[in-house]
Image (cartoon, helix red, strand yellow):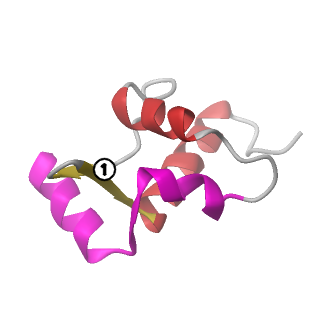
Amino acid sequence: MRNKTLSRVLTEDAITLAEVPAMLPGRRPHVSTVWRWYRTGVRGVRLEAVKIGRSVITSRQAVTRFLTHLNASNGDGGEK
């Protein structure tokens, strides 16, 4: 799994975890929230990311997959 994540993240539009909040619309999550998505996940879903040296890298596509999976697992399609 780790090698798959590494190759996937590095071939996509790579960004640091600190850059994730800026790419999201509306009320942006704090960077510590993004770290929690990476470390422990939410409802069994973790943000795909890899550690390279002292940096943790994810991708725009990985964030999209993460949020899509969370909204799909809600069962409501993400609508209120």
Residue farthest along the front direction in this orientation:
54
Seen from the viewer's position, the closer of residues 3 and 33 is 33
Residue at 59 percent of width and 35 percent of height: 73
Q: Which residue is mark 1?
A: 49
Horizontal side, residue 78 vs residue 60: left or right? right
65 above or below 33? below
Residue type at mark 1?
Ala
Instruction: Name the quarter where the C terminus is drawn.
Output: top right
Residue 77, image x, y percentages: 73, 45
Residue at 76 percent of width and 38 percent of height: 76
Residue 58, image x, y percentages: 36, 57
59 above or below 18? below
Q: Residue 3 in magenta? A: yes
Seen from the viewer's position, the closer of residues 48 and 14 is 14
23 above or below 2? below
Specify the segment rendered in magenta: 1-24
Residue at 21 percent of width and 48 percent of height: 54
Seen from the viewer's position, the closer of residues 12 and 17 is 17
Residue farthest along the right direction in this orientation:
80
Horizontal side, residue 48 vs residue 17: left or right? left
Residue 9, image x, y percentages: 28, 64
Seen from the viewer's position, the closer of residues 21 and 73 is 21
Question: Badge 1 local density, few (<14 within 10 Å), some, or many (20+)?
Answer: many
Residue at 66 percent of width and 41 percent of height: 29
Regarding mark 1 in the picture, which secondary structure is present there? loop
Q: What is the magenta segment's predominant secondary structure?
A: helix
* Location of residue 23 by image quarter: bottom right
Query: What is the tally of numbered marks visible in this picture?
Result: 1
Q: Residue 20 in magenta? A: yes
